[in-house]
Image (tube, grey):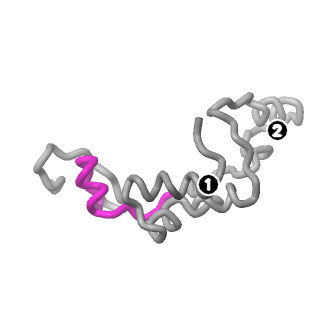
């Protein structure tokens, strides 16, 4: 089960080598929720948002969900999508490149640089 206490989650971040600044930049929204008393849920979701959509007769779940993504697929709560460090991209064998007017992430072979 995931931790629902900020101090315990910070110990996890310390253990995996994230500095307090990195943890705040990447997971600040989560740590703030823990300070406000986010309940533990153990990964169980009941789909109440979908039921609320059906009962309200709403055409979209975004009309009833607490933190919907915007039309540009951005999250107001978490700030996603966010900057990803080059080291993380290398660890995952991904490269970010401009493809016409879009920025895309592309898988690269181990040791490759993702340029084409």
Q: Residue at x 84, y 35 (%)?
A: 52
Q: Secondary structure at mark 2?
A: loop
| Residue lying at the far left of the rendered structure | 111
Asked if residue 69 lies left or right of residue 63, the reply is left
Marks 1 and 2, how far apart in space?
17 Å
Instruction: Relative to 71, say whether 54 is above or below.
Output: above
Confirm whether residue 88 shows in the render: yes
Which quadrant does the C terminus fall into?
bottom left
Which quadrant does the N terminus fall into?
top right
Q: Residues within 10 Å of mark 1 (few under 14, many from 20)?
A: few
Taking depth in this image into account, of 85 and 69 the one nearest to the observer is 85
Residue 115 is drawn in which quadrant?
bottom left
Asked if residue 37 lies left or right of residue 99, the reply is right
Q: Position of residue 73 (x, y in %)?
A: 56, 53
Point out the stretch of residues depicted in magenta: 80-99
- Residue at the disc numbered 1: 71
Q: Position of residue 84 (x, y in %)?
A: 38, 61
Residue 95 is drawn in which quadrant?
bottom left
Taking depth in this image into account, of 57 and 75 the one nearest to the observer is 75
């Amino acid at each position: 089960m995931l931790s629902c206490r900020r101090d315990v989650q910070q110990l996890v971040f310390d253990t995996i080598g994230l500095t307090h600044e990195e943890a705040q930049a990447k997971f600040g929204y989560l740590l703030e929720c823990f300070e406000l008393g986010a309940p533990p849920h153990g990964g169980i979701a009941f789909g109440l948002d979908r039921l609320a959509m059906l009962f309200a007769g709403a055409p979209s779940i975004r009309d009833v969900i607490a933190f919907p993504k915007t039309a540009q697929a951005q999250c107001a709560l978490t700030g996603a999508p966010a900057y990803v460090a080059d080291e993380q991209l290398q660890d995952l064998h991904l490269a970010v490149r401009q493809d016409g007017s879009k920025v895309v992430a592309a898988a690269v072979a181990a040791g490759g640089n993702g340029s084409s």
